[in-house]
Image: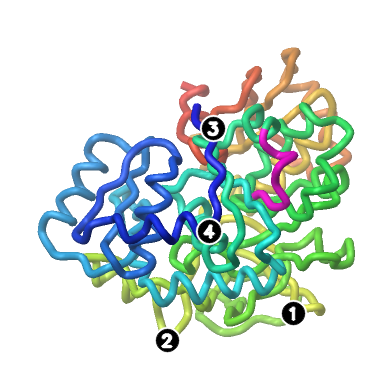
């Protein structure tokens, strides 16, 4: 695997070598990949990163969209629609760099920093790191993929890193005494942040973002109070958050509702998908599919995906809450929770736990009784030596569901 560390100046020099037109990008993170994305952000071309885990049909659908029309300069990130169909999120050059400057101001990124770029460049969280380094004059350390072993080897040369919780947990297993003091911020997103990771790693700054926002919307601040680090932080410069009910009305502070977001890096919409564009981008606000609430300090608390809340026997159950509880018990190293269809109850929670030794369902439920209400206890369990993960390190819920047959 090639590890490449490059300066912002070198990146910018190489931008002029990238021809115009549409570039379909495939494969692991590389310097050439980063340069092409940066060229697109500078308006020289259109870049369409292809998800290496997407099916052949999904890749063909993206290729068909790019073949049917001439894409203006910018970066086009593929996400999945409600029926699994790909949607191309259009991020314009102006929006991309507005967002990069906003993140840099929030995190105090400067030319002395080196950002470890291990998240896949075909995801917005990986792509955005390139632009932040270019905007700040910082160095970029390119890692082909976000496995803990490679991050562990390169971390001492870096001051910033973006990770997802599962990779950080494995990284802390390799570094039981904590991360080096030279790492001043671990930007942690992609899902709920377990409290034990915040306690074990003082550099963790939880964030909340989405592709349609150009990446981050909120983030905990450097040197913030510990209470802020247990949240997704405050809105970045140029960003805002609202919490609304099912009718679109703002709810009271502390009340859970749908998260609406504004961002300086907001997308212009979805390519060839006017209906989804109209549904998602309304009156200047991105209508997310996430649930959360704002506290009195203005910090965002993300409860989870709205589709990660199931109804079991008439009771609402947040699957992310169960995951958090599972990670708090021994000998569970990591865990994920999925919804399983069940004729009598509608849906039931099923747990997949990473553990060296098998745990029976009755034992697991007994260990969780002090942490969860009885109706929230898992009804099925599968034990694995390693959780199924996507290329970006996030849990692979589709693969997890297959474990239950």
Task: Please tell me which residue lies in front, 43 or 268.
Answer: 43
- Point out the frontmost of discs 3 and 4: 4
Q: How is the image coloured?
A: rainbow
Residue 295 picture quarter: bottom right
Decide: marks 1, 3 in contact (CB < 8 A)?
Answer: no
Q: How many numbered discs, if any? A: 4
Could you tell me which residue is drawn at 24 percent across and 72 percent down?
274
- Which segment did they paint magenta? 154-161
Task: Please tell me which residue lies in front, 385 or 136.
Answer: 136
Give the Cα distance between marks 2 and 4: 36 Å
Task: Please tell me which residue lies in front, 393 or 115.
Answer: 115
Above or below, 275 against 389 in this view is: below
- The reply to whether the magenta stretch includes residue 155 is yes
- Residue 237 visible (yes or no): yes
Residue 235 picture quarter: bottom right
> Which residue is under mark 1?
253
> Which residue is under mark 4?
8
> Which residue is under mark 3?
389
- Point out the frontmost of discs 3 and 2: 3
Question: Disc 1 or 2, which lies upstream in sequence?
Answer: 1
Give the Cα distance between marks 3 and 4: 31 Å
- Point out the frontmost of discs 4 and 1: 4
């Amino acid at each position: 695997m090639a590890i490449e560390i490059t300066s912002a100046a070198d990146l910018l020099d190489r931008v002029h070598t990238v021809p115009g037109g549409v570039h379909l990008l495939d494969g692991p993170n590389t310097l050439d990949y980063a340069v092409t994305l940066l060229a697109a952000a500078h308006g020289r071309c259109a870049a369409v990163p292809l998800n290496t885990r997407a099916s052949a049909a999904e890749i063909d659908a993206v290729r068909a969209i790019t073949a049917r029309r001439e894409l203006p300069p910018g970066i086009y990130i593929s996400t999945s629609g409600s029926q699994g169909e790909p949607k191309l999120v259009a991020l314009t050059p102006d929006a991309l760099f507005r967002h990069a400057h906003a993140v840099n101001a929030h995190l105090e990124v400067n030319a002395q920093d080196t950002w470890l770029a291990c998240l896949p460049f075909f995801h917005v969280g990986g792509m955005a790191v390139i632009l932040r380094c270019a905007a700040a004059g910082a160095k970029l350390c390119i890692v082909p993929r976000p496995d803990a072993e490679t991050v562990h080897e390169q971390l001492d040369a870096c001051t910033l890193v973006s990770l997802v919780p599962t990779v950080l947990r494995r990284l802390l297993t390799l570094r039981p005494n904590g991360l080096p003091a030279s790492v001043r911020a671990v930007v942690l997103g992609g899902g709920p942040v377990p409290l034990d990771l915040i306690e074990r790693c003082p550099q963790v700054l939880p964030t909340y973002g989405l592709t349609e926002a150009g990446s981050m919307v909120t983030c905990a601040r450097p040197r913030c109070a510990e209470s802020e680090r247990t949240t997704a932080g405050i809105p970045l410069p140029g960003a805002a958050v609202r919490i609304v009910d099912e009718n679109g009305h703002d709810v009271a502070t502390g009340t859970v509702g749908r998260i609406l977001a504004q961002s300086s890096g907001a997308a212009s919409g979805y390519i060839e998908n006017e209906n989804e564009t109209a549904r998602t981008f309304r009156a200047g606000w991105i209508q997310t599919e996430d649930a959360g609430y704002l506290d009195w300090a203005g910090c965002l608390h993300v409860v989870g995906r709205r589709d990660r809340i199931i109804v079991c026997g008439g009771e609402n159950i947040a699957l992310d809450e169960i995951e958090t509880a599972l990670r708090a018990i021994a000998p569970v190293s990591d865990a994920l929770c999925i919804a399983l269809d069940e004729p009598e109850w509608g849906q039931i929670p099923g747990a997949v736990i990473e553990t060296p030794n098998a745990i029976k369902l009755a034992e697991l439920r007994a260990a969780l009784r002090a942490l969860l209400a009885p109706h929230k206890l898992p009804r099925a369990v599968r034990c694995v030596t390693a959780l199924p993960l996507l290329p970006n390190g996030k849990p692979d819920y589709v693969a997890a569901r297959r474990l239950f047959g």
